[in-house]
Image: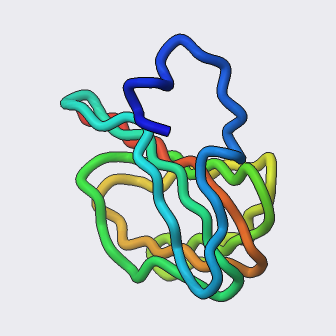
Amino acid sequence: MKRNNLKSKILKVCNLVNYSDNSVVSYTLIDNNNGTITLFAFDKGQSLSEHKAPFDAVAEVIDGEGIISISGKEYKIASGELIIMPAGKPHSVKARKRFKMILTMIRS
């Protein structure tokens, strides 16, 4: 579904991004000067390598289980939970099981 077609509609978040075998799939819902909202679907064992972001980011798990590492410390996170990843701190994401998350970053 195109982003322009999503405004002023009730959306089933888990249906906006689908799992794909041996892959990480992302779908950017909002991307503007104020920030981004990106949905991710990770197949079991898939990951995003360690990196830094210039702004705080909120990772909210909407399905399954993952591991988010921040500055070398691992946090097991599951559906219904979220974690704030601080700006400038190295972090990575890995799927313990298949999982989906919403990543929200506000630029300020």
Up/down of 50 relative to 102, above or below = below
Seen from the viewer's position, the closer of residues 43 and 47 is 43
Q: Look at 71% across and 66% down and name the residue there.
A: 99
Q: Position of residue 95 (x, y in %)?
A: 67, 78
> Relative to 14, is 53 on the left or the right?
left
Q: Look at 35% across and 39% down and name the residue there.
A: 36
The extreme left residue here reads 33
Quadrant holding the C terminus: top left
> Relative to 93, is 77 on the left or the right?
right
Seen from the viewer's position, the closer of residues 37 and 77 is 37
Up/down of 37 relative to 81, above or below = above
Quadrant location of residue 11?
A: top right
> Relative to 102, is 99 on the left or the right?
right
- Total marks shown come to 0
Q: Look at 49% across and 70% down and name the residue there.
A: 70
Up/down of 21 relative to 101, above or below = below
Q: Look at 26% across and 28% down and name the residue there.
A: 34
Up/down of 36 relative to 94, above or below = above
Q: Where is residue 85 in the image (x, y as percent from the top left)?
A: 47, 55
The extreme top residue here reads 8
Q: Where is residue 90 in the image (x, y as percent from the top left)?
A: 37, 72
- The colour style of the image is rainbow
Q: Where is residue 67 in the image (x, y as percent from the top left)?
A: 66, 74
